[in-house]
Amino acid sequence: MSRISKEEFIRIIKRLEETEKTKNEIDKIIKESTDCIISDFTNASSLMICHEDIVISLLETMFDDKDTISWWIYDLEYGKKYEDGCITEKDGTIIDLSTTEKLYDFLISEK
């Protein structure tokens, strides 16, 4: 299995996060600027979500990861909602996933 460098992983995650912010901004503009029924075609999510899913799936495959990456992105909102203890080793040791760098280190350590 090929690995990507830490720098490349960080760049990809940062780009995903920037795309998410852009999608949210577009959604807000559309909702604030229309008086008609909004169709799926005026929803930025429908235009961007498939690429995000593909990239996350590829990252999970590359790291042989079942759900840590998607959980970190979606549930922890790119680590912003990380709190000590939200993920631990079997012995109770806290796993620090507070940054993209620490997520990468954790994924590598699991190999």
Image: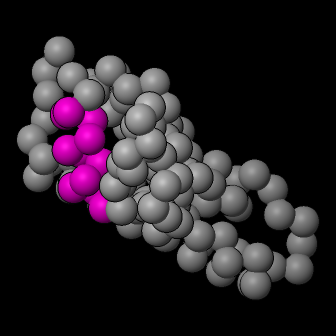
- Residue closest to the far top: 1
Kindly tell me whether residue 66 is visible in this rendering. Answer: yes
In the rendered image, residue 33, in percent from the top left (x then y), is placed at 75, 84
Residue 74 in the figure: left or right of residue 58: right
Task: Tell me the residue at 30%/48% (across/down).
Answer: 103
In the rendered image, residue 44, in percent from the top left (x then y), is placed at 61, 60
Q: Quadrant of the N terminus?
A: top left
Highlighted magenta segment, given as a residue range: 99-109
Task: Tell me the residue at 19%/34% (across/down).
Answer: 108
Foreground pick, 37 / 57: 57
Residue 104 in the figure: left or right of residue 31: left
Task: Tell me the residue at 59%/70% (across/down).
Answer: 24
Foreground pick, 47 / 23: 23
**How many numbered discs?**
0
Task: Tell me the residue at 27%/36% (across/down).
Answer: 107
Foreground pick, 6 / 91: 91
Q: Quadrant of residue 42?
A: bottom right
Q: What colouring does the structure picture have?
A: one colour
Does the magenta segment cover residue 89? no
Instruction: Give the dominant element type of the magenta stretch: helix, strand or loop.
Output: helix
In the rendered image, residue 72, in percent from the top left (x then y), is placed at 46, 49
32, above or below 60, in the image = below
Kindly tell me whether residue 12 is visible in this rendering. Answer: no
109, above or below 2, in the image = below
26, above or below 75, in the image = below
- Residue closest to the far bottom: 32
Q: Quadrant of residue 111?
A: top left
Residue 1 in the figure: left or right of residue 65: left
Residue 38 in the figure: left or right of residue 52: right
